[in-house]
Image (cartoon, coloured by chain):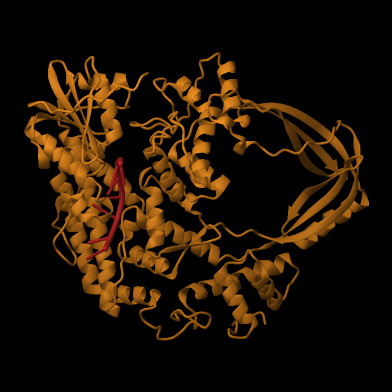
Amino acid sequence: MGRSRRARCWLPGRYVLVIAEKPKAARRIAEYIADGSRPLRCSMNGVPFWVLRRSDAYYVVGSAAGHLYGLTTDERGFPVFSYYWAPLWRIDPGAKYTRKYLSVLEFLAKGAVLFVNACDYDIEGSVIGFLVIRFLGDPGRARRVKFSALTPSDIRRAFSSLGPLDWDMIEAGLARHELDWLWGINVSRALMESVKKASRRRVVLSAGRVQSPTLREAVERTKRRNLFVPLPYFTVYVLVELGPGARKRVTVVTTKTRGEALSVARAIRARPKAIVVSVDASRREVPPPPPFNLGDLQTEASRIYGYDPHYTQSIAEQLYLDGLISYPRTNSQKIPPTIDAVSILRQLARLEPYAPIIEHILRISRGKPRPRNGVKDDPAHPAIHPTGILPGKLDKPAKRIYDLVVRRFLASMMKSAIVSRTRATLLISNKYHVELSGGYIEDEGWFRAYPFLRPRLEELPPLRQGTRLRVLRAEVRSSLQKAPELHTKLSLVKWMESSGIGTEATRARIVKLLFDRGYLAEARRKVYATDLGLAVAEILERYFPQLVSVELTRHFEQLLNSIRLGRAKRSKVVDEAKQFLDKILRDFRDSYMDEAGTELAKALGFIKPSKKCLVCDREAYKEGLCRYHYDAYRSLVEGYEEWRRRLDNISFRSYVERLARSASTGSWVKDVARAIIDGRLKPMLPYE
DNA sequence: GCAAGGTC
């Protein structure tokens, strides 16, 4: 196709103004609804819009850039119940770019005879378009267009039956904003004011429907990890000779006490023989994975390159803005047939590493490749895929993310891999069954394109049923239980997803926010709660328990659903929330604010503890210990009984020394163990 | 300054 000169832009006197949620959507809508000729691309202040003709009328397709308005207030202090909508660029320093979008829509609104809200067909899209029409246009001359995907057929169908404004959906969306604002701003202010009252110091603290349950989850993991007392257990291993020069170490049993393990090992040494009782060979097809949604991309980037989910998302967003990949904030694992996979492949084939794979795909599919779709779907967007536009110079992380997206897209169009596995059961000393497994890859299939999920397999030497084998050695090893895992940034984002809080676009951002607030910190990619995070979670749990529960989101969903179905009114729902908040916020101010503020100020180091913990610098709570070391002390004492049973009457001293040395021991328990060893802490126990 | 939600 030759490069055509762009026609001069002009604006008709009267037109229908179509408002899209984002410029990319605006362009596609314009292309799909125009009669005959291509729409005219215009731009003002770098913001594009399109002019076109459709059934003897002029249409102008303009664009928002997500929310252009937000809630704000002029009042200080809490409780605060009055707020209003204001242009986002005035109230959110991170949203300055929305100003030019708003001013272009303001200009375009002047000549519009009809306004069409063509934002994504969801609750937020209804609000985005409505607020533009309300502040810049006229809701009395407005329509809503409903499409579920940005495809020509869906868009054309939707524009041929414009509906009235979807008032119930708008009301539900407005209510969502108001409820989140009321809860979030009020409780955040309550926290900040309590600290100020207790310490006369200012600090930014926050709480909200999504961030606070997420904080609580990280706090619970931190506590479980730091309070963990590992128990000992015992493993009996044997070294079996499978063939000439092929020896394998195999676990026979694990036991709770040393005595049991030793007697198993003795029995094996007395009859050091094994026999192959069965050999099973199986062939398994491993189907290709579906193309990426955002969560899958974040998982893989974390697993393969150690990138945290927010980092991955920001790289993917840049690749999207550069036109290299499709919209990344999607939950979909599907590539609809409307996406021209062949032409994307032909473009990508110009990139050296992909060329042979693409050639292979086109050959095996006879030029008609079809991506294998996953189950997850998204109403507004397909799975993440390369656009076919070739990248220029990318930095290393961008190159890696782009490569993941391309390879995953390619893999989804390839054949299953075939993996052969062998499973053998041995009977050791006529008494103990153990399983061996091995295998190899018979056909690489899609692993060629996407090697990151290729299993690492070890081949077993050939074994036949009935073969007798020698047991060369039998050993007992004692181990300590592994500690419960802390979250990673990724697992926290996944936890949010499985709990149904936050959205594709916000989860990673909210985890980052908890770090920025100083509630969470990271060591070796593991997320732990700081003292401030522990204190905030504690205070919220005690005085605003609704806000740390994922149930608040469920409750909101029910309310919003009722509004959407016309069974409840926004004003009533919001008023009830205000009344409830008014009560709990006044109770907090009247009765608990001093206590809460003092606790938070101590966690922040603004107030010195009146009496220090014997083990750390925190405030003493019981028996001379802070609340965390007191709990750790109790865990340590409770754990001793079981240790004595398993390790034939180990002394308390040796027990404590083992805990102090083990990597599995929770850090608070370790602190207590060390304090006992060096005499800072005298255990009050019946055992000494 | 504080939420959660959308997106350049």
Residue A687 percent coordinates (x, y): 66, 79
Quarter of the image for the N terminus of chain A: give it. top left
Task: Report the chain shown in orange.
Answer: A
Q: Quadrant of residue A361?
A: top right
Q: Is residue A685 left or right of residue A187?
A: right
Task: Report the chain shown in red.
Answer: B
**Between A186 and A389, the one nearer to me in the picture:** A389
Q: Quadrant of residue A138?
A: top left
Q: Residue at x 11, y 42 (%)?
A: A135
**Between A29 and A438, the one nearer to me in the picture:** A29
Q: Is residue A137 left or right of residue A346?
A: left
Confirm whether residue A147 shows in the render: no
Q: Residue at x 36, y 44 (%)?
A: A505
Residue A119 percent coordinates (x, y): 24, 34
Q: Residue at x 57, y 65 (%)?
A: A228
Residue A576 percent coordinates (x, y): 17, 52
Confirm whether residue A636 shows in the render: yes
